[in-house]
Image (tube, rainbow, N blue to C red):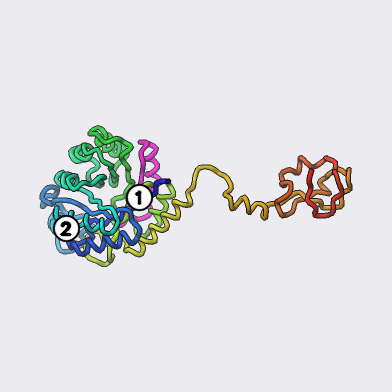
Amino acid sequence: MKKKVLVIAEAGVNHNGSLDMAVDLIKEASKAGADIVKFQTFFADDGITQKSIKAKYQIDNENNSLDQYSMLKKLELSPDDHLFLIKKCNENNIEFLSTPFDIKSISLLSKLGLERFKVPSSEVDNTFFLRNIGLLGKEVILSTGMATLGEVEYALDTICDAGTPLNNITVLHCTTQYPTAFPEVNLRAMNTIANSFNVNVGYSDHTLGIEVPIAAVALGAKIIEKHITLDRKLEGPDHKASIEPEEFSRMVKSIRNIEDSLGSNFKKPTQKEIEMRLIMRKSLVASQFINKGELFTQENVTTKRPGNGLPANFLDFVIGRKSSKDYQINDLIDL
């Protein structure tokens, strides 16, 4: 069976620190058809100084502080929270995933038994972080927002040198802008990554709408990641660059339709088309009365539907041959 595109609903920090909201995100992601719902695991004290300022989009979307530490501290998920959310994912038949942002988080997720690990774009040049991911030998999803091709190569080499085989890694093209304007997407870079490193690729999307993820699947993406929110009007850093459940559901359905449409590399008629050829294509027929022994010519032979006689491309083979019988107008020519 052909492996389907893996669709990740990025819940991220759109739970706003509420476990009830996190559970609702799990339920909505599952109903929308996502394969995975992904949160974020971090310990503010381990990864952020209190001098770290917010990005402009974070200031615009969450106005009560100017520093990242204060914003993220209240969005931390405890180890017990993780266990609870894993349980809820199991109950809703969707895989739990969370992106670690520091070494302590990698260790926690490993102890929780996760079989795949996400490297966020912010850590693509973090040697210490990449080595700790690579040492696990698990399936890796590597986001590459803000990265050059050389930095992607460095991240892949570091993860692989630590012990993870290249065929365990899928690289996601990504533009770290919230939201991303269409001219900034540069979707063809996804295939540049695939061709440069002989690696599976996907796309992590921050555009408004669902067109670009669908296009990415048509171009060969194996994984699609898209932020999901219960309400884009909620206050919080990522809600405005997310999509709501109904739109997420439409995206998943469109992705599945595109998957079905891609088919194989072979150009051949389908069984339905073979049946249709008998109706739609034309056969060689007599355009005039033709006597037995008379030569077939351009004047007494033409092409008309249906296509159940000699195919129209037999014309040159027939012209100049003698008729073996009499033909009335519109009779199918045979030999």
Farthest residue toward the front? Answer: 91
Instruction: Please say whether residue 104 is one of the residues in the magenta stretch.
Output: no
Q: Residue at x 83, y 40 (%)?
A: 321
Q: Residue at x 22, y 39 (%)?
A: 136
User: In the image shown, does 146 or 76 lie closer to the viewer?
Assistant: 76
Question: x and y percent of residue 121 in the render?
Answer: 26, 46
Q: Quadrant of residue 164?
A: top left
Residue of label 2: 75
- The amino acid marked with disc number 2 is Leu
- Which residue is identified by label 1? 6
Q: Residues within 10 Å of mark 1 (few under 14, many from 20)?
A: some
Q: Does dot 2 land on a helix, a strand or a loop? A: loop
**Helix, strand or loop at disc 1?**
strand
As drawn, the label of residue 283 is: none
Q: Nearer the viewer, residue 32 or 254?
A: 32
Q: Residue furthest top?
A: 161
The magenta segment: 179-204
Image quarter in which the C terminus is found:
top right
Which x, y percent locates residue 68? 16, 55
What residue do we see at 74% from left, 46% from top?
Answer: 310
Q: Are marks 2 and 1 in contact (CB under 8 Å)?
A: no
Under mark 1, the amino acid is Leu
Nearest to the observer: residue 213 or residue 48: 213
